[in-house]
Amino acid sequence: MNKFLFTTLIISLLLVGNSEAQSKKALFPDTPGMVSYTYRDSFKKDVAATLDTLQDMGIKDMEFSNLFGKTAADLRAMLDERDMFCSSFGVSYADMMEKTDQVAENAKTLGAKYVRIASIPYTAPFDLAEAEKAIADFNAVGKVLKEKYDLTFCYHNHGFEFQPHGDATLFDLMIQKNDPKYVSYEMDILWTFFPGADPVLYLEKYGERFALMHLKDLRKGVEGNMSGGTPVENDVALGTGQLDIPAILVAAKKAKVKHYYIEDESPVYYKQVPQSMEYLKSLKK
């Protein structure tokens, strides 16, 4: 082959490769939401300034798990001023069960569609009796939230629920026994992976039962367990840890997850969150 033909062939291959790369669509085209817990230290100091920071990053969708000394009405006004919104409101198990009406009213004022809790009072290891109590509580409070307030209750897994039960886990039992009319789930992908489960398989198995998702990654080399806890330094920027984020996002899209929130508990969240957002933006189908 002469030099001219060889050069022409190479240029053609490069053009084809470049064209294919450009034609690939973004795997995660939307700007993710943010959990207020990620910026909890900042919110405690100055709510308005923290919202300004998030607004500058392009964040619109918020999940609040604290009112940070504000009323729900004040916080809603601050969000409205910045063209931001609250889609999910997180509270404690005790408040959910004992102050259901107050929780619901705050959620409605914020504009949230979902109310969630992120843990269950239990004595390690989490057992069948505790799972069955949670199932009953969730069905009861979920019914009130839906029928009285048109709100959807969500439970956010925290790792300890994956104790073996039959040929599956207590977490499976909870999903199966909770009434889908009243109870949905928020998958925390780290707290699904950490106890040894596969987020992709759970998304494929239960599909639309997962309405919400927390996006986070686990430091490489860290071994998981069912304690429901790990040092906050083990939260790393998305794409730099152990989780297969692209595969999880593909499964989540098929499962029709409605809201995705970055949660980064590390002390350097302010560095890692922009990295995570750039990583999500870089992913292609």
Image (tube, rainbow, N blue to C red):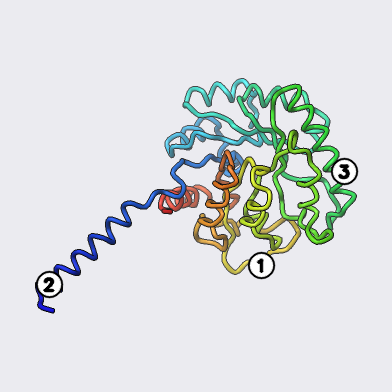
Q: Earlier in the sequence, mark 2 or mark 1?
A: 2
Q: CA distance from mark 3 to mark 1?
A: 30 Å
- Quick one: 39 or 197, which is closer to the camera? 197
- Residues at discs 3 and 1 in contact (Cβ within 8 Å): no
Figure quadrant of the C terminus: bottom left
Tell me, for residue 133, which label it has, or none. Answer: 3
Tell me, for residue 223, which label it has, or none. Answer: 1
Q: CA distance from mark 2 to mark 3?
A: 74 Å
> Which of the two discs, 2 and 1, sits closer to the camera?
2
Three-letter amino acid code at disc 3?
A: Lys
Q: Which residue is mark 2?
A: 5
Q: CA distance from mark 2 to mark 1?
A: 54 Å
Q: Earlier in the sequence, mark 2 or mark 3?
A: 2
Residue drawn 66% across and 32% down? 114
- Quick one: 252 or 13, which is closer to the camera? 13
Three-letter amino acid code at disc 2?
A: Leu
The kind of secondary structure element at disc 2 is helix
Q: Looking at this view, name the residue that lies furthest to the bottom.
A: 1
**Image x and y of residue 236, in percent:** 54, 57
Figure quadrant of the N terminus: bottom left
Tell me, for residue 94, which label it has, or none. Answer: none
Three-letter amino acid code at disc 1?
A: Glu
**Image x and y of residue 65, in percent:** 66, 36
Residue drawn 71% across and 56% down? 229
